[in-house]
Image: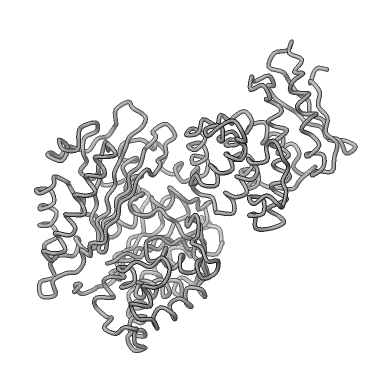
Amino acid sequence: MLISMTTSVTAEAPSSSLQPPLPPRVPIRQTLKEAYQQTDQPRSNLPGNSEFILAAIDIGTNSVHMVIVRVDATLPSFSIIGKEKDTVRLGEFCEDTGNLTEEAMARCIAALKRCLKVASNFKADDVVAVATSAVREAGNGQVFIERVKAEIGLPINLISGTEEARRIYLGVISGMELKGKPHAVIDIGGGSTEIILGSGGTPDFLSSSKVGAVRLTARFITTDPLSKKEFEYLRAYVRGVLEPTVDQLKRKLAKRRQQGEVLNDPLKLVGTSGTIECVAILNAMRATGAEPDPINGYKFTYDELSGWVNRLRKMDYAERLALPGMSDRRAEIIVSGAIILQVAMELLEVSELKICERSLREGVVVDWMLANNLIDNRMSFQDSVRERSVQKMAHKYKADGDRIAEFATTLFDQTQGKLHDWDILEREYLWAAAMLHNSGHYIGHSAHHKHSYYLIRNGGLLGFTESEVEIIANIARYHRKSLPKRKHENYNNLTSKRDRKIVDQLSAMLRIAVSLDRARSGAIARIETTYQDQTLMLHLTPTDANNSCELELWNIDYKKPWFETVFNTALAAKLANS
């Protein structure tokens, strides 16, 4: 039985709220066995190597989660290379004492041992573990922490509710751009729900409320299917706990809007955690018969959620378990979790939610990077999520697209308002596609444009929606060889006529940009364009004044028909001094 609940813990985050309290850490470049036998002082700097393997463990009320990442200090960025999860139900407290039970602690320690073994297999340089709601509230929480240290040598950092919210926010902004617009972030855990307000910079508001899917199921649900009486009581209870928190968030948002610090844009909602991802999978399976891929960026509405709440509460455990993608443990708690989300969306007055796969575990990684001075400007990490993700993929696949990206974006800028009216988003798609157009060489030269499409489509670009990734992958796909055709499955995957027009026109620009460096020798230093009488003239400045750039001029002439077709204009090129 879970212990009694109180109201929320909230904090209006000060300007220094991203400065982390440093957790105990394992020394770099030692074996895990040696490292677990000692604790050291937090490091302010890392050694000179540019890549590190970090394991971040989240010990929650319901599950133990671990993510293993490769941190690239040169960008800075990180790539997820491994995951581990075990549902241990640590929050199944003793009803009489309010303590963690012996059985729950044993399950958790066994899961942690497995995590350490996996981390060792990945040759992790550092391991960071945090504990949240269940350990915070248990009467013997500190005893458990000491027991873990004694039995397996793993130091655990017990974090407060607001600190948990701060790290969740760090995780979200590491994988999703908020673009300076106000966003609420909600994370529904087993024992608590965190609600955060931020626009991509310093968080404006952090809160942790003692309502969680495991907690409410254990305390309030005795019927299966859920009776109408318990359903109504559960909704009322959640509203009573969350309402003061949401009111504080709204006051903070209103104040910032009055001061002109935040634009008067509607509040958007980002959701993380297993409960919310489960609802997304159920919704996508019902609509399309397939799980969302990727789930990051997937959206569902309040009305769709409410439909699922009504269906789930009328099902018994066996019926819920039979739903696609439903695990046995999730089937036990999904009703409570969905109700928490439904009430939160009502209070926040939002009609839609967007999924972010990153949360506390990834926030622990970002926190580690901050503490070790791998991120100089804390908010530059958010401002360039998409850019860093593209650069990371380009580096991984040795795509070498910087010069082509410069040519492509120059062509885009100089023809804007003349040949097209695309804006900053479409420019970003073209830049990303140009950076990655040659990534397919990583697989093989033959049909490498098709390989590039596959790698971009499945490479986990961060900060982009699924439809945006599809656009970028298609632009790169058509930088050479055949033109876009509806019979091509990848082109047919584009969701609208507008998206296909974007791909048509931007892939035509990319073809010309590729022609400008046909020999990959840097023959062209820069380009200027003039537009007159339905003709676009490219004025090319050679890097070497004695170079006639015959190969580049020939290739432009060879590649220009598609450009001339989609823009309904003639294209010509000449050297700037000729």
- Residue 187, horizontal then vertical, whole percent: 37, 62
The residue nearer to you, when weighing 95 against 279, is 279
Q: Quadrant of residue 509?
A: top right
Left/right placement of residue 557 relative to residue 80 reads right
Left/right placement of residue 58 relative to residue 513 reads left
The residue nearer to you, when weighing 549 against 161, is 549
- Residue 226, horizontal then vertical, whole percent: 34, 84
Q: What residue is at 78 percent from the left and 39 percent from the top? A: 563
- Residue 90, horizontal then vertical, whole percent: 20, 63
Figure coloring: one colour
Q: What residue is at 44 percent from the left and 42 percent from the top? A: 381
Location of residue 472 with respect to 276 vertically, above or below = above
Location of residue 504 with respect to 344 vertically, above or below = above
Spot the residue most to the front. 446
Number of disc labels:
0
The residue nearer to you, when weighing 369 against 102, is 102
Spot the residue most to the right. 533
- Residue 293, horizontal then vertical, whole percent: 50, 56
Q: Quadrant of residue 311?
A: bottom left
Q: What residue is at 73 percent from the left and 39 percent from the top? A: 508
> Quarter of the image containing the C terminus?
top right
The residue nearer to you, when weighing 114 against 468, is 114
Whether residue 243 can be seen here: no
Q: Quadrant of residue 80?
A: top left
Whether residue 254 can be seen here: yes
Left/right placement of residue 574 relative to residue 396 reads right
Location of residue 289 with respect to 356 vertically, above or below = below
Spot the residue most to the top. 546
